[in-house]
Amino acid sequence: MAIANLHQTLLFCTTEKNDLLNEIEHLTTQKSFMLDVAANDSRLLTAEKSALNSKFRKIFENSEEYQEDYQSYTEIPEFEVALDKILAEITEHQQETAMAETVFDEQITTCDTEIKEIEAYEESFKSQLTSNISKDFNLSLGG
């Protein structure tokens, strides 16, 4: 009976380990998605800054008043406000993305730790199983 219980426990450990490995795979996929989001944020920031520069350059070039008051379109107060707004939005999103990546890393580490604990239990159960089988074999031989 002890052999059957140990064998059942080993099967349970294997199932738990496989579940954790699947969870790690899922978390790794989510983390990869977050890395793609971060890269997209950088591209979006570049595109929005470029569009903003073009917009205010045209406004500056078509306004004698701005040309008299400012040396460059980047000195126009509305340009600075719009640029700050874009930077704030992207920075906030990048911080959220970084926090999500950290959470995924922590969850992956937790799963890895649990797998190592299960593997340690498995070794103990395998040792007990081997010992019990050896004892039963010796008893059956009359030893």
Image (spheres, rainbow, N blue to C red):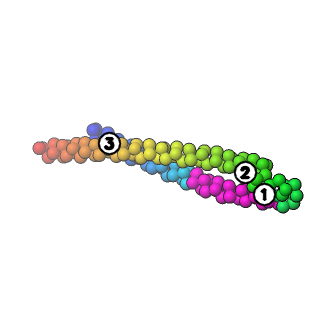
Residue ID for mark 1: 71
Q: Amino acid at mark 3?
A: Tyr
- Asked if residue 74 is positioned above or below residue 95 in the image, the reply reads below
Distance from the alpha carbon under mark 2 to that under mark 1: 18 Å
Circle 2 or circle 1, nearest the eye: 1
Which circle's residue, 2 or 1, is located before the other in the chain?
1
Q: Is residue 26 magenta?
A: no
| Residue 33 in view here | no
Which residue position is annotated with label 3?
121
Residue 37 within the magenta-colored segment of the rendering: yes
Mark 2: few/some/many CA within 10 Å (<14, 14-19, 20+): some
Query: In the rendering, at what x and y percent does residue 140 appear?
Result: 17, 44
Q: Which image quarter: residue 2?
A: top left
- Amino acid type of the residue tagged 1 in the rendering: Gln
Question: Mark number for residue 83?
Answer: 2
Residue at x 48% of width, y 44% of height: 107
Estimate the spatial distance between the alpha carbons at disc 2 and disc 3, rounded to whole Å: 57 Å
User: Callout 2: helix, strand or loop?
Assistant: helix
The quarter holding residue 48 reads bottom right
Extent of the magenta region: 34-59
Secondary structure at numbered mark 1:
loop
Whole-angstrom CA distance, mark 1 to mark 3, is 73 Å
